[in-house]
Amino acid sequence: MRRAVRTPAKRLEPRFYRRNDVVAVARDLLGKVLCTSLDGRMTQAIITETEAYAGVEDRASHAYGGRRTQRTEPMYAPGGIAYVYLCYGIHHLFNVVTAGSDVPHAVLIRAAAPLAGVEHMLARRSRSKADKRLLAGPGSLSQALGIRTELSGTDLTGDVVWIEDHGIRVAANDLVEGPRIGVDYAGDDALRPYRFVAATCPSVPARAG
DNA sequence: CGAATGATATACT
DNA sequence: GTATATCATTCGA
């Protein structure tokens, strides 16, 4: 298999996040590497599935109609921070806040492929072996990377949670788009094609094994 | 297929 | 302040 070109890992800068086109950011996040350093444990995962939430105009968004609460406050900050919230009382869902100040757009990270620190992911998920479900689904992904609601508002250009570009590219014919998951309550907005999936796992740099 | 599980938003007193 | 419905899901039967 063709390996991705080895590019020095480069942390995404604020200007990546601050674009107003949240759908473009969601697409661009595929193949990027989500990293956490928590409890002295470092984990890295290649993002394979994202969903865009288009702020005030999107009924599926927590910020629909400009709703502004203590929970959603981070979404109104300039792009480049985390928005994490608890869903169904169990799952911590991780979002990347995008766009400028007072434009509450965000991208939900739904799935990823393990790249580094797999042993920590397994421990956090109480599993003994890595399978396809280790980082599949936003709740599982967050649990494996140690992301919790207390990290909501965390600066993604810091050294706790951040995202790197490893030069991994998702081919156009690998990119699948469709309606978002679990947003039936949003009426017509549930039909928006705001979900992006890297159909086959992006090439993993050779050093992974 | 359905229960688990708790913070949050909203609508009350 | 208190009550209650809801939820960007997951796992096991």
Image: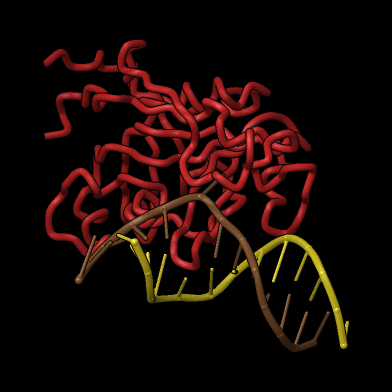
Chain colours: A red, B yellow, C brown
* Viewer-side residue, A41 vs A144: A144
Question: Is A92 drawn above or below residue A106 in the view shown?
Answer: below
Residue at image coords 73%, 59%: A70
Residue at image coords 72%, 30%: A100
Q: Quadrant of residue A41?
A: bottom left
Expressed as whole percent of the image width and height from the top left, the position of residue B10 reads: 78, 63
Question: Is A159 drawn above or below residue A125 in the view shown?
Answer: above
Residue A159 can be seen, yes or no: yes
* Viewer-side residue, A91 vs A206: A91
Question: Is A74 drawn above or below residue A104 in the view shown?
Answer: below
Residue at image coords 21%, 56%: A122
Expressed as whole percent of the image width and height from the top left, the position of residue C8 reads: 51, 50
- Quarter of the image with the C terminus of chain A in it: top left
Left or right: where does residue A68 sit relative to residue A89? right
Q: Quadrant of residue A189?
A: top right
Question: Is A68 drawn above or below residue A149 in the view shown?
Answer: above
Left or right: where does residue A21 sit relative to residue A151? right
**Badge count:** 0
Left or right: where does residue A165 sit relative to residue A201? right
- Quarter of the image with the N terminus of chain A in it: top left
Expressed as whole percent of the image width and height from the top left, the position of residue B2 reads: 37, 69
Left or right: where does residue A204 sit relative to residue A171? left
* Viewer-side residue, A121 vs A166: A121
Residue at image coords 31%, 45%: A136
Q: Quadrant of residue A163?
A: top left
